[in-house]
Amino acid sequence: MTADRTAKGSKASASFGRTSIDRRVALKLMGGGLAAPFVLRSAESRAAGPLIVVNYGGAVAEAKDRVLYKPFTELTGIPIVQVAGPDLAKIRAQVESGDVEWDVVDVVDPWVYAGEEFGFYEKVPESLYDRSAVIPAARRDYSCGSYVYAGGMAHSSIRYAEEGQYPLSWAEFWDVEKIPGRRALLNRVINNLELALMADGVPPEEVYPCDVERAFRSLDRIKPHIAVWPTPAGQPVSLIEADEIDFAYNFQQVVVQRRREADAPVAFSFNQCLLGILWTAVMKGAPNKDAAFRFLEFAMKPEQQIAFANITSNAPVYPAAFSQIDKSLQPWVPDLNREGSLVINGGWWLGKEEELTIRFKEWLIS
């Protein structure tokens, strides 16, 4: 059984601490100050205060700490403080109030478009990295495409070892009579609309623009059969491993992590997977803007992307880097050109996410 059909392995990542630390607290802890402007000498860099980076926590944050944050600090002397939990509302509030505490933020596709539309991020200097060397989909003016990830169907490879016992399409995931079992979908409207449309027979290439009413009608059919709507991205795999659910939407990187850590019996299918780019941006008005861009320059080096891919299985945005990924991981690495997959269209979500999130939350409790 190959990774193209269902790849075996995995459990959820250990949760990265949901630190509520803000810049003022971080400065007290680290003894820094904001009086001096950022310069490249390490002592003066420290005087500018720590670089506050916001990421999604879990295994990805651990990998970033290992191959990006710590090496960057060792190279430059610029300390980094991690905060888990990017939030578009907080990004907007900080920028619009002029009280910006974050420097660098990881953002998903829809937030890239929102940030560009409303001026939440600093423009990336042309000289920061060679844009011609990265995939076209990862080239934007106000953020850097960091890596490509995949979300797809996960299931227990012990309880459901034979094809036909587990879903290999979203129509089958929705078909509880053909394939009975406890199911889980993430507690968010983004991704679920797309999955619901594919489950209703819409080909991946025709999902956008989304027919919202059709998607909610499709969600109505599966709702009674969803045992849990997890919020943490890694939780579905832990629930499968604990025999609390059977089938779930989750990310390939979580499966890979648990396969490596514990040889966990969880499989993953790339069929009809959702493919997205995780972006990194510098906050508009970031207190340590120069240091933030220096970090982005470091993070966008091909060698750092390769090191990150070899830990997480997420795809680098440099096509030339693929050949340097560990061969055992290559079947797990997402490919934006994978046949039958759906590339998330963040532009479609621009101006719709807030309203549809409210509707989804109301629908969940109705």
Image (cartoon, helix red, strand yellow):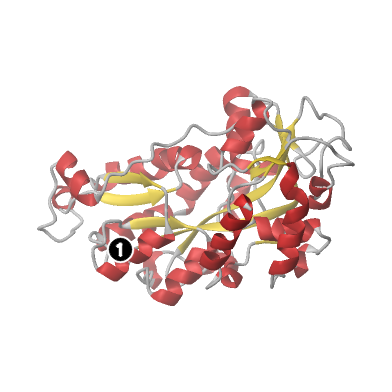
Image position of 134 with respect to 273: above or below? below
Label 1, on which residue?
A: 94
Q: Could one spot residue 338 in this view of the protein?
A: no
Foreground of the two, 228 or 253: 228
Q: Position of residue 255 (x, y in %)?
A: 63, 36
Q: What secondary structure is marked by label 1?
A: helix
Where residue 276 sits, quadrant-wise, is bottom right
Quadrant housing the N terminus: top right
Image position of 222 with respect to 12: above or below? below
Badge count: 1
Judge left or right: residue 205 versus residue 80: right
Residue positioned 15% across, 43% down in the render: 28
Foreground of the two, 205 or 355: 355
Foreground of the two, 65 or 209: 209
Extreme front residue here? 366
Extreme bottom residue here? 117
Where residue 163 sits, quadrant-wise, is top right
Image position of 119 with respect to 358: above or below? below
Residue positioned 54% across, 65% down in the render: 353
